Each structure stands twice: as structure tokens, then as C-alpha cells.
Amino acid sequence: MRHHPDRRSIALTAVLGGLLLGILDFIWIKFVPFPFADLGNSSAVWAVAAFAFGFWVRTGWVRAAIGAAVALVVAVPGYYAAAALIQGDEWSILWAPTSLLWMSFGVLAGVVFGIGGVWAHERGWRQPVGIALPGAVLFAEALIDASRINHPNYGIDPLWDVLIKTTLGVLVVVVVARGTRARLLALATALPLALIGFAAFRLAGFGL
């Protein structure tokens, strides 16, 4: 029988993992060359991290949701602290309205994708939905990037983001699912979820 993490392990991993996510995200943006550096600016990548947390927790929707939400909330000050230390940004950004807004998005994404990670282990309709979620959010953000292609502010650069995120979306589903049938079902489920995610991104102000 597989060992499930206890509450202390979940809490510690949420806090430390969130700090590490934020710090590494800034370092990635700062030092990794284009086009892969753009993944550091991806909300979808943070959502996938929340899914990975829930997938690790394995059981208990509430624990997975709270832990993933805490991780994403903590990641925000981790990111801005890294920016202050590495490139001299103002420390006041840690409590600025922008940071609070990102933390609120973190709560929402943590709950949804943390639960999705648990669902990926379950049976019935929840499993393909859970497995599909990380792929769907990457596909949704790829659609946002696609809408920017040839825009005067972006040119054709977003094409790289579309290709990378679409590839990662397929890859994460293939890795998480077990068996060809489960993979195909999850990918099929990810497509309508991606459209919902695209609409949610646009509603939240992501776009041109």
C-alpha cells in the first residue's frame, strides 16, 4: 500500500514548495533564453504545479485544495522577494495590490487544480477530468498566445509559446495517464475544458 503524506508533510511541502516555485520562476525568467523563458510568465505552469501537489497528496480533496492554494499564495512573495534580491526591485511590491491580486488567483487555481490532482487517482468520470486539467490549462493559454500572433506588440513570437505549451499539455497528460485508452480519453476531455479555460482567461483580463 502506498504511503500517503501526513498533515505536517503537506503543510511543510506547501510552504517550502511554494517559496521554491516563486524563486525558481523568477530565476527561470531572468536567465533562461527565449522562447523557453516565457514559461516563467505562464499562469498555466503554476496551475500545473498545483495539480502536481494534489497528485502527490493523492487522497483528501480538502487537504489537496488548501495545500495547493497555500503553495501558490506563498509563491507570489517568493517571486517578488527573488526579484528584489536579484535585480533590486522594490520590496514594497510584496504587499502591493498586484501581488494581492495574484495571490487571489493562486487561491482559485490551487483549489481547482489541487483537487484535480486527487481526481487523477480516482475512478469514474473524475479521473479523466482530473488528468485532463493540466493539459487543458496549457492548451487554454496556448489559445491566448495564438490570439496574439501578428499583433503589433508581439509579432510572430507567440507562435513559439503556442508550440511549447501545446506540446507540454500533451506530454503531461501522457505522463499522468496510464494506458492508451486513458490518455486518449483525457486528451479528448481536455479540449472542451481548454475552451472553458480560454474563456476564463479572457474574463480575468488575460489577452491582448
Image (tube, grey):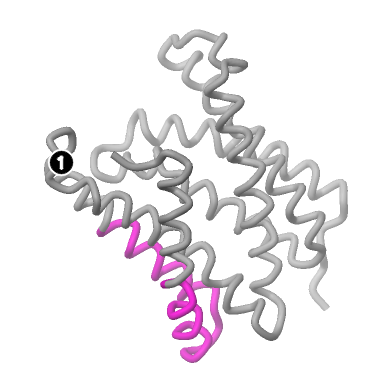
Residue 176 in picture, x, y percent from top left: 54, 72
Whether 207 is among the magenta residues is: no
Measuring 41% from the left and 72% from the top, which residue is drawn there? 191
Q: Quadrant of residue 142?
A: bottom left
Measuring 71% from the left and 78% from the top, which residue is drawn there? 122
Whether 179 is among the magenta residues is: yes
The span shown in magenta is 163-191
Q: As drawn, is 54 to the left or to the right of 203?
A: right
Toward the right, the furthest residue is 7
Q: Main secondary structure of the magenta part?
A: helix
Residue 92 vs 125, above or below: the answer is: above
Measuring 48% from the left and 52% from the top, which residue is drawn there? 200
Quadrant location, the C terminus:
top left
Q: Secondary structure at mark 1?
A: loop
| Number of disc labels | 1
Measuring 51% from the left and 62% from the top, which residue is drawn there? 134
Which residue is label 1 attached to? Answer: 151
Which kind of residue does numbered mark 1 sit on? His
